[in-house]
Amino acid sequence: MMLNNSLNDNTAKEALKNFQKRNKNWSQSKIAQAMSVSPAALSQWLLGKYNGDSETLGKKVGKFLQLRFAQETAFLNFEYLKTHQSRQALAVLTYARVHRSLGKIIGGAGLGKTTTLRHFRDSNESVFLVTAKTGYGKYDILEDIFTEITEKDWDEYKEHKGIQGGKKKMERLLHKMLAGTDAMILVDEAHKLRYQGLEACRELSDECNVPCVFCGSEELLNQTSGKYASRYQQIRSRELMRCVLKNEVEAMDINMMLESIKTTAQKDVVAFLKKKAEGEGHYRTMAAILRTAINMVQQEGRDLTLDDLVAAERTLMVA
């Protein structure tokens, strides 16, 4: 909900109570201090017993909530940023969609592959994202795609439509649903698919003329180019673009992350975050440290320092 500083008293009181429920570290006394009013005045206002200028105090509450809302929103937007790796992955996704082809995004854990897939899905119409599980075969992955499109698993769908049939009927229905559409299929954790699962996605893409992008670890690359490469020939022949993400972090990416949460930092802060992003855990570890540190400094209303990052890292290691 977008907040403004002209909320009526009842709405402002309710919004302030909800804010405190979400943020246990913000006591009533701390809120009053941030608003430059006495704790007693705020308490009386919340109880409807304030004898002063209630309208002015209500506006102060509105301004306080508006600022906190802006900070929370900026913090949430940190989830996706166009890093060097993300730009590479987006190039594959866009190319596959335009040319209705297969594509591959390869990279280790923590490089932002899944976050980029979700961003692409949320930014485009008719893009369906599924996540493979270990040992998934043909009908496992097809049923997940079917469920993602219909928002019902096969058994629920049959009951809803009053029809009967097994997985082959589901496969035929899925092909019928996708044929001639602008749909696109994204398969995350694709290295967990067995050969039959990968082939099922390839057949779906071929027969329905819909693009499909596989995303996974280097194991996916080894599967389709190792000693069993011949059996994956049809997949490789339709794969027009791929990218192999490397753990290369640019200072520009770190600065962009800091700007997204309205934070400026010294060079030592950027260097520390860059080093963490290039280490074990990659962006995921760096992001966890940054989130923890930002939470600390926002509460105290000051700029981010290297000491904050070191303290945040220690907190996470203890946790």
Image (cartoon, grey):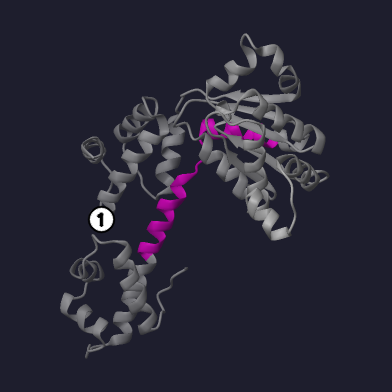
Q: Position of residue 83 (x, y in %)?
A: 50, 35
Q: Is residue 30 left or right of residue 183?
A: left
Camera-side residue: 161 or 261? 161
Q: Residue at (21%, 75%) from the top-left corner?
A: 37
In the image, which residues are magenta?
Answer: 67-94
> Does 155 appear above or below 315?
below
Q: Amino acid at mark 1?
A: Gln
Q: Is residue 254 left or right of residue 303?
A: right
SS assignment for the magenta stretch, majority: helix
Camera-side residue: 96 or 88? 96
According to the image, label 1 marks what residue?
Answer: 299
Q: Position of residue 33 (x, y in %)?
A: 20, 68
Q: Magenta stretch containing residue 81, yes or no?
A: yes
Q: Is residue 7 left or right of residue 112?
A: left
Q: Position of residue 202 (x, y in %)?
A: 73, 29
Label 1: how many residues lie within 10 Å, few (<14), some (14-19) or many (20+)? few
Secondary structure found at label 1: helix
Q: Residue 97 falls in which quadrant of the image?
A: top right
The residue lying furthest to the right in this view is 180
Q: Position of residue 110 (x, y in %)?
A: 44, 32
Q: Quadrant of the C terminus?
A: top left
